[in-house]
Amino acid sequence: MKANVVSREQPVVQLRGITKLFPGVQALKKVDLNVENKHIHGLIGENGAGKTTLLRILCGIYVPNEGEIFLRGDRVSIATSTQASLLGIGAVHQELSLCPSLSVAENVFFGRQPVKGCIGLIDRRRMIEETKDLLDELRMEISPMDTVGHLSLAEQQEVEILKALAMQPSLLLLDEPTSTLSGYEIDLLFNLLNELRENGVTILYVSHKIHELMDVCDRISVLRDGKHVKTITRDEADEELLVHLMTGRQPSELYPGLPKPVLTKPKLEIRDLSANVGGLRVQNIDLKAYAGEIVGIAGLVGSGRTEMAATIFGIHRKETGTLLIDGEQVRVNSPCEAIEHRISYIPEDRRKQGLFLRLLVPDNVVANELSSVSVHGFVNNKQVKSEAGKYISAFDIKVSKWDQIVGYLSGGNQQKILLARFLATSPEILIVDEPTRGIDVGAKREIHFLLRKLADKGTAILMISSELEEILGLSNRIYVMYGGEIICELQNREATEEIIIQAIVTAAGEKEPNGTTTKKASRGEH
């Protein structure tokens, strides 16, 4: 891929004394940072450390209150995203900015469609052909004509990356670009980033995944509480040092212990569950979860984990299957019926499926239990504030004021609010889908300890996670899924990443008539 190659060896980006204030919050405090030419420069820190704010200043979404920005030695003012684009800055944001009703090609060329003829008609054929060339070059297995809203979350992330690269930037800003990608897709992205670097593109890469940064970055800068703590080289970086710089803790402190639950009869039992969800068939599902136990659900993207969980919760209609709670068969054909039986489900995408981003923190916390804060059908705001305050305190949710809008909070605090909202219903069975996706190591630790504390109080938890380290660190037992089925059950003491991956590879080979590995298996997490 061609790029606007930078010839001078001075830093591409120099930030001097960058400060950014929001109402009640100082997001950045006199940050100094150099990003060298033709480097992949990592930026890491806990949620709320200022990483995303720094990127948004560079791409013209925010204007700093103080400080100077130099690009290739020249002082610049970046007040709009258009100015950033003209300066050769491209960005992929954590929140997708796609039009779901448009095609992949229309999103990639949005606002700059090629035209033909003197009257300026859009040249659709050229737009589709150029998009196809980009897709082929980046080895993305989607069509230019696919409607974006019909793509998976991972595929939409690919389109967002494609959209930025189509502008041929000389400075590329990436904010959590792998949050929805599988291991195979991450490998492709890293190969692409290395190619871009060789072609003269400088990359500023924000991630909460320490191993990713150590794999792909030349240098890594750590932010904490809006301040630049330290910049280290790839050779100096290790997990223990980075965790300590970010949080002041050691990696061994990120997971609680695994107490042995009291196994009498299962709190939740599923027998012979099957469903057809959007063309993916879930079948032959048998599982158990005991009170006080965290049961991990591992598997590839597309293995049916989310579809199974949503069917248990009544979002999708099951074809066959029996659900038992405390040994008694119950009917769950809708989320309302699930909640009546003290089952809660925390979805994978907190921003689209879980939270009311434009509402206040207390309104989100009590959204599932409005009857408890209402009198004669009218919501009592004092009760809302009081009830929400308990969870804000108990979960250590960081807000500048109690009536803050949820959409302005960091990802980790949003995730804790989502947990608080569903825990307000006092569930006996909790299903959590990717509970720590897109949040930093410090916030992860808090979520891990919250889940363990909940289990210790007797809740049975089903936890879907694409991070095998998280599955192994939290789960008493582990079910592994492939192709819509459970392929094995493992006790924590016998499970390793290698055993889980080998089970998936074996299942993939058995499902292919010629014994070859399927496309799904090749796109799995590693």
Image: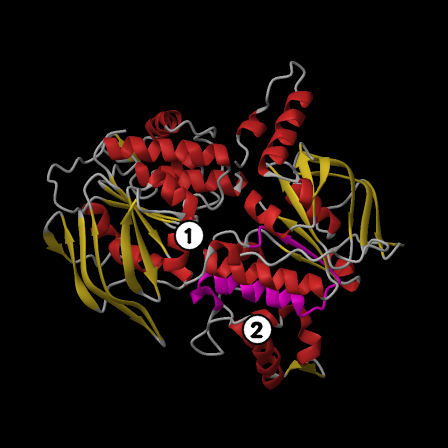
Give the residue type that dot 1 points to. Answer: Glu
Indicate which label's residue lies in the foreground, 1 or 2: 1
Give the crowd class for mark 2: few <14, some 14-19, many >=20 residues within 10 Å.
many
Start-end of magenta stretch: 406-435
Is-magenta flag for residue 514?
no
- Which of the two labelled residues, at mark 1 and mark 2, occupies the earlier sequence position? 1
Q: Is residue 351 visible?
A: no
Q: Residue at 52% across / 72% down in the picture?
A: 396
Residue on which the image places disc 1: 240
Residue on which the image places disc 2: 363
Q: Quadrant of residue 150?
A: top right
Question: Label 1's element?
Answer: helix
Give the residue type that dot 2 points to. Answer: Asp
Give the crowd class for mark 1: few <14, some 14-19, many >=20 residues within 10 Å.
few
Q: State the image coordinates of residue 70 (x, y, percent, origin top left).
A: 14, 54
Q: Residue at 37% across / 63% down in the picture?
A: 49
Q: Residue at 25% across / 36% down in the picture?
A: 168
The residue nearer to you, when weighing 483 against 250, is 250
The residue nearer to you, when weighing 88 against 446, is 446
Q: Is residue 63 visible?
A: yes
Question: Label 2's element?
Answer: helix
